[in-house]
Amino acid sequence: MQKVITADNSETFFNEKVQESYHSHKGAVEEALRKYVIPCKIKELAQTGKLKILDVCFGLGYNSAMAIDAALEENPRCEIEVVGLEYDPFIIQKIQDVSPLIKFYKQYKRLTPKTLQFKEGNVSIKILLGDGREMVKQLPADYFDAVFFDPFSPKTSLEMWQISFFKKNSNTLNVFLRQNGSR
Ligand SMILES: C[S@@+](CC[C@H](N)C(=O)[O-])C[C@H]1O[C@@H](n2cnc3c(N)ncnc32)[C@H](O)[C@@H]1O
């Protein structure tokens, strides 16, 4: 897979099969911050002392790693749980080949297709390897505080952009957040 350096100097890869990059060329880390961490009000959620994130289409894990940085900056004692859904072990392996400017990403290097999980202090990460549309059925309802949804585009991965899949992901969200958008 070819490495691509994006506009904020962070690295991503180009997937030949789908003919798309894993991140925006405008900035991979920037994208994690602007499209996921800020809209989800991660800092506000971290103030509650507990944060559970479902990272759908985990890939290299930039979105949740960036969220962990923001949450720990706001509240170093926040208990954080990340569950990632990813079907391609090869992209998990590629975590070893990138070094984004995300503090917690050093820990993400512990994720390999064999380990798939770790706990470091008050932060735990677990990747469920398989088709996200099936794996999501194993997850509890009303559980997560944020769901990051990051498939390839509908042009190449229309199967991921179905209302039924949105509904299943949305069902895993904490019911209060589902109804009100934030606490
Ligand atoms: C746009 S990339 C996500 C980038 C990722 N969020 C990151 O920070 O690196 C889309 C990801 O969706 C994964 N994917 C595609 N189909 C999937 C499926 N059915 N279930 C789970 N993951 C899938 C791909 O392997 C790829 O890693």
Image (cartoon, rainbow, N blue to C red):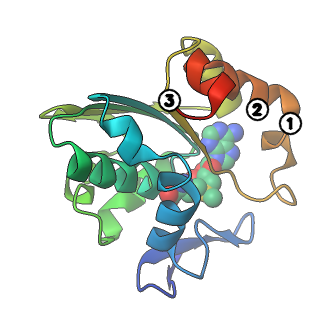
* Residue wearing tag 1: 162
Tell me residue 83's x, y (percent). 44, 31
Q: Mark 3 or 2 closer to N-term?
A: 2
- Mark 1–mark 2 Cα distance, whole angstroms, equals 6 Å
* Residue wearing tag 3: 183
Looking at numbered disc 1 in the image, what kind of residue is underneath it?
Gln
Q: Answer whether residue 148 is visible to the viewer in this image.
A: yes
Foreground pick, 138 / 72: 72
Looking at numbered disc 3 in the image, what kind of residue is underneath it?
Arg
Q: Answer whether residue 173 is visible to the viewer in this image.
A: no
Foreground pick, 80 / 159: 80
Look at the numbered disc 2 and say if its residue's Cβ is closer than 8 Å to ligand 1: no
Residue placed furthest toward the left: 121
- Mark 3–mark 2 Cα distance, whole angstroms, equals 21 Å
Mark nearest the camera among 3 and 1 is: 3
Tell me residue 8's x, y (percent). 45, 84
Determine contact: label 1, label 2, CB under 8 Å: yes
Looking at numbered disc 2 in the image, what kind of residue is underneath it?
Phe
Q: Residue at x 47, y 46 (%)?
A: 41
Tell me residue 159's x, y (percent). 84, 41
* Residue wearing tag 2: 166
Displayed quadrant of residue 80: top left
